[in-house]
């Protein structure tokens, strides 16, 4: 099965919505929000109802407009990154989507896995900023143009931020995975939970599989997800092979391409693959697939 690079940002978007789910009726989430007509995107823009107070710690600092910048595990947040996200906030304020957005109505949240020592040293030396840990893993940074908070994922409360604190590739069975599996139970068909859990499973599966130390319930959960993914990979592989064989016979009509793509029965796809290999023309293949494949 082909292993693609882990896409952390979509899972982060899902986890952010999960963590703030209790306040979702008061928040609008805009992913990869375009600041200009040409691509210049904020990771996440959260617009809050003006008078609503967010109860969850990661949202206590929120004003009306909230810019969130996220870094993948292993990526550091440096001085240049600070100026970039500060620039995003300035551009958003100046864009005039609503008249007279004040700096006090904008917050910036930086989400990283490791404490950015060089950046903090720079901010203290250059601006005289104070860095205060308001909640576990949540630091407020003072004396900047906008209200800033820094979230250190591995330091966050694993109880209050069940998902965000575990958006990592170094999870432990008892401390991390089992509580996450319990929180996921009953949410399997909810898109944001599924996206978050899928990435976390992929990021942490290999070492647990090799160690053979999964608890039974968790192993069943993970095995089901991986079996689904492997099954999908088989389908896609056969589908590509059919299309490639037919393409040697001539242009594949869109309707036929869609028919093959929508077919999810691996047995039928396998039969179609054999048929494509011995067909002398596209019409020959179509004629033979009009009848049910046994």
Image (cartoon, grey):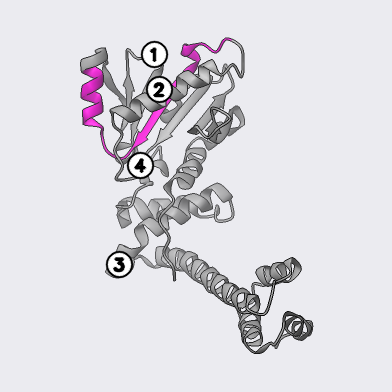
In three-dimensional space, the C-alpha distance between marks 3 and 4, rounded to whole angstroms, equals: 22 Å
Kindly identify which residue carries mark 2: 86
Q: Which residue is mark 4?
A: 158
Rendered residue at 45%/31% (across/down) = 68
* Residue at left offset 57%, top offset 76%: 241
Q: Label 3, on which residue?
A: 213
**Mark 1 Cα shell of 10 Å, populated few (<14), some (14-19), many (≥20):** few
Residue located 60% across and 73% down the image: 239
First reached walking from the N terminus: tag 1 or tag 2: 2
Q: In which quadrant of the rendered image does the N terminus lie?
A: bottom left
User: Label 1, label 2: how many angstroms apart (C-alpha)?
Assistant: 8 Å
Residue 146 lies, with reference to residue 231, above or below; the image says above
Mark 2: few, some, or many residues within 10 Å (few <14, many ≥20)?
Answer: some
**Magenta stretch holds residue 38:** no
Please report whichever mark, 2 or 4, sits nearer to the chain's N-terminal start. 2
Query: Which residues are drawn in magenta?
Result: 100-124
Front in this rendered view, residue 96 or 16: 96
| Tags 1 and 2 touching, CB below 8 Å | yes
| Tag of residue 145 | 1
* Mark 1 / mark 4, whichever is N-terminal: 1
In the rendered image, residue 199, in percent from the top left (x then y), is placed at 44, 54
Residue 117: say if magenta: yes
Q: Looking at the image, is mark 3 or mark 4 earlier in the sequence?
A: 4
Q: Quote the CA–CA distance across marks 2 and 4.
A: 29 Å
The label number, if any, that marks residue 287 in the structure image:
none
Residue found 45% across the figure and 27% down from its top = 59
Which quadrant of the structure image shows residue 64?
A: top right
- Percent position (x, y) of residue 138? 33, 29
At label 4, counting other C-alpha atoms closer than 10 Å, the crowd grade (few under 14, some 14-19, many 20 or more) is: some
Element at badge 1? loop
Q: Nearer the viewer, residue 284 or 271?
A: 284
């Amino acid at each position: 099965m082909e292993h693609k690079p882990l896409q952390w940002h979509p899972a982060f978007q899902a986890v952010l919505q999960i963590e703030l789910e209790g306040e979702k009726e008061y928040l609008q989430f805009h992913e990869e929000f375009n600041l200009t007509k040409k691509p210049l995107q904020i990771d996440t823009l959260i617009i809050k109802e003006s008078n609503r107070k967010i109860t969850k710690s990661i949202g206590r600092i929120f004003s009306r407009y909230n810019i969130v910048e996220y870094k993948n595990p292993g990526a550091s947040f440096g001085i240049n990154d600070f100026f970039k996200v500060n620039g995003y906030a300035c551009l958003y304020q100046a864009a005039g989507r609503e008249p007279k957005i004040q700096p006090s109505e904008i917050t910036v949240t930086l989400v990283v896995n490791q404490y950015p020592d060089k950046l903090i040293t720079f901010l203290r030396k250059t601006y005289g900023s104070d860095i205060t840990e308001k909640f576990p893993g949540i630091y407020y940074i003072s004396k900047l143009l906008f209200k800033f908070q820094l979230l250190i994922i591995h330091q966050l409360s694993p109880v209050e931020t069940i998902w965000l604190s575990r958006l990592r590739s170094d999870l432990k069975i008892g401390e991390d995975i089992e509580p996450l599996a319990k929180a996921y139970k009953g949410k399997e068909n909810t898109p944001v939970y599924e996206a978050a859990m899928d990435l976390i499973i992929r990021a942490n599966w290999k070492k647990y599989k090799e160690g053979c130390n999964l608890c039974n319930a968790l192993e069943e959960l993970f095995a089901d997800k991986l079996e689904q993914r492997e099954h999908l990979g088989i389908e896609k592989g056969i589908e590509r092979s059919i299309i490639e064989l037919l393409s040697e016979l001539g242009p594949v009509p869109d309707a036929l391409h869609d028919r093959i793509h929508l077919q999810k029965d691996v047995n039928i796809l396998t039969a179609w693959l054999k048929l494509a290999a011995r067909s002398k023309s596209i019409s020959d293949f179509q004629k033979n697939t009009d009848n049910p494949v046994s």
